[in-house]
């Protein structure tokens, strides 16, 4: 709430008359801070403010986004009615008309183009119940194989890397409370200070306790300021760097032989491969001196405990999976996992980035982290859903690949739930063109986003203030988000919308749900026996225990606070180390004559994802009114660019115009642009369409670009 | 729920610190009773030597007075010694026959000085140095006797000896080893210390073992094992302490050197804890205050059922409290094949530093002469920080807090971005309210109260502010020398007391100078007019309507300014102006930087006729108002479309005419990127960009202190541009101080805050509506006058 600083009494605001309080959880990042919206009535006006609520993860803290989250949720622009596009213009229609239109179009399209011509694009901002239901909706109500979600652009590399290495993917292998006691940590491509601000005190505490912090990032950020050693490597050279560190660790005998022997496979191959590498070459490629690498490796190897945290910096690469595995190799070789104060943390980005990747929103996945191509898994889920296994579609394609399918006319209709892919996908111009090609596009959103504007039908949904459900936070802790604020206008909860469409399509028997909790009850059974087993978790238990860390296979079992203490989740109980070569990056964009600079992207503290929500919030917009390009002053001078002036950035895929911001804290061969803005400031228009071979992650963190000043002088 | 009874045996520093922590953790859990053998409330035992040395007084070393015990509902029995603990019954018994039940018991009986078992040790004049009584005894003795001897050249012995010197006695220090403080110092430091103390007048008898104390009833001297002897009227034994564990022993608790406790400071009886010098943890008994305090914190958490990481032992460091002598020692101080040292020895300044490393961690240090690096060293050692080789020698130097990130930030830069708290705001509040901790800063300013991410920076700032390097001053907010009130206080008082003229303001608010001064008088005039729109003041302008107004000049002639919106003049207007100038023989027309023409030198008697002949709207000039809006209409070099810019400027000008502002505002609207209206050096500037957006800059100045405007917003339409600018002006009017330039106001309020207000549609409408109303009202007032 913004208080005016007025000098004169007659202008000042009146005293508060009544107050109402609504419990909820922050709609933004994976910390899922608990909070309260306080509604104060002042004469005829309502004033709102948000305050933090104590809980075991965020401990009552909120960042500037959380404090102002209500500003978008209560914004004038919130959609309150379904909108149907008639002659290129949106007109408000009733739900009945909207649902009829969907039925008619979906039926027609499936008749003309086949079942798989329909597609569903989901989100990691929705609740577990909704993510689960969306997967079921695609497979049971629409019977299409084409479903994927925006988490593909976010957590896919870490998830796949952890699955391949450990056999399981839960963001944090240890509880967040262990962080302050670790002795050394590597923060690889993670800017927690701006992305998950309320987690910072855990890291600050660790530092106070004497932990040695190593940060890997091409830029100096608020996070790297915390570090004892900042390895400012060239973008995209993280595999070389990780390999270099492990090589030093092995050659200085800082490994844990017993752990390697008993708990891992493939160490010898890794060792052999690394022994043929030369530190001089690695130093050349990464731009990191041998002595800095030695220092980092020695501390991490020698200290009694250690943790590695990774995030999008090293993951949003076309070899993101391999990069994650290269870092996990270090943990395994030093035996720093499955023990107190030692472990791995994949710092999940989105609010439900963890839960939304577990229960069947992914093209190849069924609830409980089951696989759609595993016949046992198919059988189990088909039984839970009460359908014949043969009716369960197979594996679809990843998020970006769906737009390629649209371009090839294999997909002709799409339903997008709570996502803004024309901003968040790579090669965003192409994505926009693809969406325009669709015969029928339905978008479910709070606002008329850049994506929603392309829709034929827009359905108004509810916000974090109104929509109850569970979300799984950065640790893997399942939380219950209370939400009792009155629904605005004719908006409906996501799960309700899915149920009503299913009903219209004659699939009501599979979607009888009257509350989020009823869906959760089915999710418990669907996830039972899977890797992400929620069976032991109930709403009551979450309330009582302030959240439950999965896996929790039975109501009698406690939260699993630390993973892999005795064995890893692969069949044989062993973790798999991997030989990670730099060959995997051969397709990475490289600076060249035409595009001489490397572009990397990221977040700013006051904005979130595509900015659709945060840009609507006055207090957040006030902090960053537009995108910008961070550039080293020497580089700026070389390109004739002055401070605070507009610059056109070109890549093979498109162009954008943003304002320059000079800073000596970035490498001279690299520029940075945050990704929260749309249209001509949408940096993803520059990003290429190469994808990681395992997890289909695009290369957001590195593009080759050229820049020039925008001048009409 | 009934409170449980907690009994603390021992009213000393360790016990009381524990009680303080318990009160902080949960003050409603226990009813607390304390027994102390001494007649005093808790005092600082470690300050006794400072009392002897005359650096402080006995009154000043009290930590908790009776009032504190009372306030915290703690029952204190002084002069009463607990003689028995009955574990089974959970009761204690005292030497006064009192028996009392406990639910929890803390033993903090400390230790007793060790008295050498030698003949004569019971003579008068032979004493230890531990209590206030001992201290008083020494002071008394010094008034009668001349010669003192201290047995023991350790920390306590040297401090006692220095105290006795201060009291005017001759002092011999007898020490078994050839090195002073041989448990804390290496030979080099010990010798430097000895030399320094000798210069202060202390005498040393080293490598001597005491055999007996001779004399009749009173000590007269000391004889050593080698047969030699010295005379001495007062013999102070400072040869160590032994834990006071007889009570625990009698109660059947396990003891060794001390009372055995676990990581929670619990004895084997879970209801009984022991803390301080009497407790033995992991084979260690600690006799220094810091470890005892660390134990107290853990004990308190445990006894209040909070999670604790457990007590893990302490790193011992010592600092000698003798004025003029700086000695510090921590951990290991001898080299071995595994432990390597870095030395620094400066014979000129008599400074010696040595740090011992084991691989990449510092494990001990000795500092003599300059101990300023000790906080950093201690922290590094306690936390076992990893120090790479090239940084090892940095540890010899103290941290310079003026180099920290927090200290080097610009004053107006935000430390806390969540709550927009600038460095300057923190510094002002720290100085004004004497804030000492991050928590206090958080409570007072909100900095670090949300996400907590900036806590380290706040901490750095505090360290910097309280360091010798800090010399920034708090801003003087006084309005002028006529009053002690701040400008805000004055404006508030005018409104709450309903003061409606300058005389009553000065009277009621106790103006020191009843005439006022050139600072306060115009400001008060302005505020009165803002608060009471009907307030009449001496106008230097004439206003009848928009075609009939003028500025009164000092020579009693009048000036008028034809309103040429956007600086455009057509032929008809020019014709009229020409005729008027000719007809009334006016001075030459002055062209303003705001693209207007000023007709000067109109005689009073001609004024009405000039208005009538001109018959056109005039730009009303008042002292602090908005100057005409400048556009780029005269830029002939660029072929850009100037119409949109011209229209915007005309519209803005119409909506702000006649409005008073805290200070003159200059506005410029440039039609293209050439910025020919100088938009970036105006209070408000607009540039029409070639992608059809409008960049709005604020806080620029082309005055004596040239300043570039800051980008406030990039508007997407002309309508939005106008709205934002009008709301900006109104917000400035309603919150800026008199004569405060826009840039000063922006620095004070912060551009982020101003945007938060302007981007909020409700607030924006509130402001623009208010501006409209104010303009109407102002027109009416002008008309009435």
Image (spheres, grey):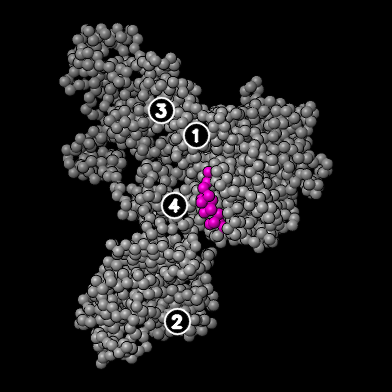
Q: Earlier in the sequence, mark 2 or mark 3?
A: 2
Q: Position of residue A494 (x, y in %)?
A: 66, 39
SS for callout 4: helix
Disc 1 target residue: A629
Q: Are marks 4 and 2 in contact (CB under 8 Å)?
A: no
Q: Chain of mark 2?
A: B
Image coordinates of residue B206 in percent, x first then y, are: 32, 80
Name the mark on residue B476. none
Where residue B51 sits, quadrant-wise, is bottom left
Instruction: State yes or no: discs 2 and 3 in contact (Cβ < 8 Å).
Output: no
Which comes sooner in the sequence, label 4 or label 2? Answer: 2
Crowdedness near tag 4: few (<14), some (14–19) or many (≥20) residues, C-alpha within 10 Å: some
Q: CA–CA distance between discs 4 and 1?
A: 28 Å
User: How would you rate the neighbour count of disc 1 (Cα within 10 Å): few for under 14, some for 14-19, many for 20 or more?
Assistant: many
Q: Chain of mark 4?
A: B
Q: Tell me if label 1 and label 2 are in contact, CB under 8 Å.
A: no
The chain letter under disc 3 is B
Residue positioned 22% across, 43% down in the render: B483
Q: Quadrant of the C terminus of chain A?
A: top left
Q: Nearer the viewer, mark 2 or mark 3?
A: 2
Q: CA distance from mark 1 to mark 2?
A: 70 Å
Q: In the structure shown, which secondary structural element does the residue marked by tag 3 occupy?
A: helix
Q: Nearer the viewer, residue A265 or A384?
A: A265
Residue topped by disc 2: B245
Which region is colored magenta?
A: A287-301
Q: Is residue A81 depicted above or below B13 in this figure? A: above
Q: Nearer the viewer, mark 3 or mark 1?
A: 1
Q: Which residue is mark 3?
A: B725
């Amino acid at each position: 709430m913004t208080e005016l600083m007025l000098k004169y009494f007659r202008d000042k605001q009146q005293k508060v008359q009544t107050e109402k309080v609504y419990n909820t959880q922050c709609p933004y990042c994976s910390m899922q801070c608990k909070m309260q919206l306080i509604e104060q009535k002042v004469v005829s006006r309502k004033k709102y403010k948000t305050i933090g609520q104590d809980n075991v993860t965020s401990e009552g803290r909120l960042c500037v986004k959380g404090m102002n989250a209500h500003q978008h949720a209560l914004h004038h622009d919130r959609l309150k009615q379904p909108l149907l596009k008639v002659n290129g213009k949106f007109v408000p229609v009733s739900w009945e008309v909207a649902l009829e239109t969907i039925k008619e179009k979906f039926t027609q399209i499936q008749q003309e183009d086949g079942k798989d011509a329909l597609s569903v694009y989901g989100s990691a901002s929705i609740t577990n119940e909704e993510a689960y239901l969306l997967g079921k909706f695609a497979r049971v109500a629409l019977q299409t194989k084409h479903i994927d979600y925006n988490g593909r652009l976010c957590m896919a590399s870490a998830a796949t890397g952890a699955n391949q290495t450990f056999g399981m993917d839960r963001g944090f292998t240890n509880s967040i409370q262990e962080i302050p006691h670790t002795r050394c940590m590597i923060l690889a491509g993670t800017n927690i200070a701006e992305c998950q601000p309320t987690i910072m005190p855990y890291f600050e505490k660790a530092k106070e306790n004497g932990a040695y912090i190593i940060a890997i990032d091409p830029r100096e950020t608020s996070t790297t300021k915390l570090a004892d050693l900042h390895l400012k490597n060239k973008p995209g050279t993280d595999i070389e760097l990780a390999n270099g560190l492990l090589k030093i660790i092995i050659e200085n005998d800082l490994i844990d032989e017993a752990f390697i022997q008993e708990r891992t496979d493939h160490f010898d191959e890794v060792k052999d491969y690394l022994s043929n590498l030369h530190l001089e070459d690695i130093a050349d490629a990464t731009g990191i001196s041998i002595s800095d690498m030695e220092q980092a490796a020695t501390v991490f190897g020698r200290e009694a405990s250690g943790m590695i945290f990774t995030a999008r910096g090293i993951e949003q690469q076309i070899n993101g999976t391999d990069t994650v595995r290269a870092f996990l190799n270090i943990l395994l070789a030093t035996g720093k996992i499955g023990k107190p104060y030692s472990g791995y943390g994949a710092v999940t980005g989105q609010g439900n980035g963890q839960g939304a990747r577990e229960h069947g929103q992914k093209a190849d996945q069924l609830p409980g982290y089951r696989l759609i191509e595993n016949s046992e898994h198919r059988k189990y889920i088909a039984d839970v859903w009460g359908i014949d296994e043969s009716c369960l579609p197979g594996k679809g394609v990843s998020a970006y690949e769906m737009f390629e399918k649209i371009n090839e006319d294999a997909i002709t209709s799409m339903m997008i739930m709570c996502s803004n892919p024309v901003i968040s996908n790579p090669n965003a111009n192409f994505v926009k063109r693809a969406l325009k090609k669709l015969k029928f596009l339905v978008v479910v959103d709070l606002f008329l986003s850049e994506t929603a504007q392309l829709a034929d039908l827009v359905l108004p949904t509810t916000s974090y203030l109104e929509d109850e459900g569970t979300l799984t936070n950065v640790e893997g802790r399942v939380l219950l988000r209370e939400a009792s604020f009155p629904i605005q206008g004719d908006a409906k909860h996501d799960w309700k919308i899915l149920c009503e469409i299913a009903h219209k399509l004659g699939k009501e028997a599979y979607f009888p749900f009257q509350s989020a909790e009823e869906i959760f009850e089915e999710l418990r059974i669907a996830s039972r026996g899977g890797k992400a087993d929620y069976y032991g978790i109930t709403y009551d238990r979450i309330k009582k225990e302030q959240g439950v860390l999965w896996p929790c296979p039975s109501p009698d079992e406690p939260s699993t606070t630390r993973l892999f203490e005795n064995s890893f989740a692969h069949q044989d109980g062993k973790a798999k180390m991997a030989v990670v070569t730099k060959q995997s990056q051969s397709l990475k964009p490289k600076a060249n004559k035409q595009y001489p600079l490397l572009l990397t992207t990221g977040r700013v503290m006051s904005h979130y994802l595509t900015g659709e929500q945060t840009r609507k919030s006055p207090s957040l917009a006030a902090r960053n009114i537009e995108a910008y390009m961070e550039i080293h002053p020497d580089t700026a001078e070389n390109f004739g660019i002055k401070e605070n002036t507009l610059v056109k950035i070109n890549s093979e895929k498109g162009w954008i115009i943003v304002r320059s911001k000079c800073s000596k804290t970035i490498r001279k061969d690299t520029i940075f642009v945050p990704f929260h803005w749309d249209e001509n400031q949408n940096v993803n228009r520059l990003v290429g369409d190469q994808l990681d071979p395992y997890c289909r992650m695009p290369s957001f963190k590195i593009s080759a670009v050229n820049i020039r000043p925008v001048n009409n002088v | 729920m009934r409170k449980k009874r907690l009994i603390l045996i021992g009213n000393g520093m360790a016990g009381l610190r524990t009680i303080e922590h318990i009160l902080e953790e949960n003050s409603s859990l226990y009813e607390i009773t304390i027994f102390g053998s001494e007649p005093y409330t808790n005092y600082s035992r470690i300050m006794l030597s400072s009392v002897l040395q005359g650096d402080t007084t006995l009154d000043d070393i009290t930590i908790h007075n009776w009032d504190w015990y009372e306030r915290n509902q703690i029952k204190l029995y002084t002069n009463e010694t607990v003689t028995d603990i009955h574990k089974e019954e959970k009761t204690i018994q005292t030497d006064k026959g009192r028996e009392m039940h406990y639910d929890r018991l803390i033993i903090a009986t400390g230790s007793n000085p060790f008295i050498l078992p030698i003949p004569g040790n019971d003579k008068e004049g032979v004493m230890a140095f531990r209590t206030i009584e001992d201290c008083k005894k020494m002071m008394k003795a010094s008034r009668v006797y001349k010669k003192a001897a201290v047995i023991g050249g350790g920390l306590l012995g040297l401090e006692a000896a220095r105290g006795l010197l201060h009291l005017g006695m001759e002092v011999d220090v007898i020490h078994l080893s050839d090195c002073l403080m041989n448990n804390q110092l290496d030979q080099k430091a010990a010798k430097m210390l000895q030399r320094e103390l000798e210069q202060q007048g202390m005498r040393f008898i080293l490598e001597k073992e005491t055999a007996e104390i001779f004399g009749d009833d009173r000590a007269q001297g000391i004889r050593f094992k080698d047969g030699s002897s010295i005379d001495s009227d007062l013999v102070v034994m400072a040869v160590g302490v032994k834990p006071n564990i007889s009570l625990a022993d009698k109660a059947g608790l396990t003891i060794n050197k001390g009372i055995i406790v676990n990581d929670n400071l619990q004895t084997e009886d879970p209801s009984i804890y022991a803390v301080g010098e009497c407790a033995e943890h992991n084979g260690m008994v600690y006799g220094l205050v810091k470890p005892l305090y660390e134990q107290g914190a853990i004990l308190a958490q445990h006894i209040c059922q909070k999670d604790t990481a457990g007590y893990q032992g302490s790193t011992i460091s010592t600092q000698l409290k003798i004025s003029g002598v700086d000695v510090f020692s921590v951990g290991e101080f001898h080299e071995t094949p595994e432990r390597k040292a870095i030395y620094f020895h400066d014979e000129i300044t008599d400074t010696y530093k040595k740090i011992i490393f084991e691989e990449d961690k510092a494990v001990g240090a000795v500092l003599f002469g300059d101990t300023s690096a000790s906080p950093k060293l201690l922290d590094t050692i306690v936390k076992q920080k990893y120090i790479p080789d090239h940084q090892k020698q940095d540890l010899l130097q103290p941290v310079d807090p003026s180099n920290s990130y927090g200290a080097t930030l610009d004053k107006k830069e935000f430390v806390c971005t969540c709550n927009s708290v600038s460095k300057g705001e923190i510094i002002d509040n720290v100085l004004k309210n004497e804030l000492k901790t991050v928590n206090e800063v958080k409570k007072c300013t909100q900095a670090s109260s949300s996400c907590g991410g900036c806590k380290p920076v706040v901490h750095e700032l505090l360290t910097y502010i309280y360091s010798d390097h800090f010399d920034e001053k708090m801003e003087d907010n006084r309005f002028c020398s006529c009053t002690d009130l701040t400008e805000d206080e004055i404006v508030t008082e005018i409104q709450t007391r309903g003061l409606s003229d300058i005389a009553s303001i000065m009277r009621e608010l106790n103006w020191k100078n009843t005439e006022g001064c050139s600072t306060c008088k115009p400001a008060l005039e302005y505020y009165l007019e803002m608060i009471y729109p009907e307030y009449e003041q001496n106008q230097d302008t004439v206003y009848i309507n928009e075609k009939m107004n003028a500025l009164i000049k000092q020579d009693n002639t009048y000036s008028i300014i034809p309103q040429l919106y956007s600086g455009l003049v057509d032929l008809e207007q020019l014709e009229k102006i020409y005729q008027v100038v000719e007809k009334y023989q006016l001075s030459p027309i002055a062209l303003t930087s705001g693209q207007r023409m000023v007709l000067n030198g109109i005689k009073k008697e001609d004024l009405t006729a000039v208005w009538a002949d001109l018959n056109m709207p005039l730009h009303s000039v008042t002292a602090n108002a908005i100057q005409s809006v400048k556009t780029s209409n005269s830029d002939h070099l660029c072929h850009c479309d100037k119409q949109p810019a011209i229209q915007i400027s005309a519209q803005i000008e119409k909506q702000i005419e006649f409005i008073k502002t805290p200070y003159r505002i200059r506005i410029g609207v440039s039609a293209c990127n050439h910025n020919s209206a100088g938009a970036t050096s105006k209070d408000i500037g607009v540039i029409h960009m070639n992608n059809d957006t409008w960049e709005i800059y604020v806080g620029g100045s082309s005055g004596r202190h040239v300043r570039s405007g800051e980008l406030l917003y990039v508007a997407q339409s002309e309508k939005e541009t106008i709205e934002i600018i009008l709301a900006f002006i109104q917000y400035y009017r309603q919150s800026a101080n008199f004569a405060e330039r826009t840039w000063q106001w922006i620095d004070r309020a912060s551009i982020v805050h101003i945007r938060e207000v302007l981007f909020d549609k409700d607030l924006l409408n509130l402001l623009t509506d208010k501006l409209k109303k104010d303009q109407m009202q102002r027109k009416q007032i002008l008309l009435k006058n």
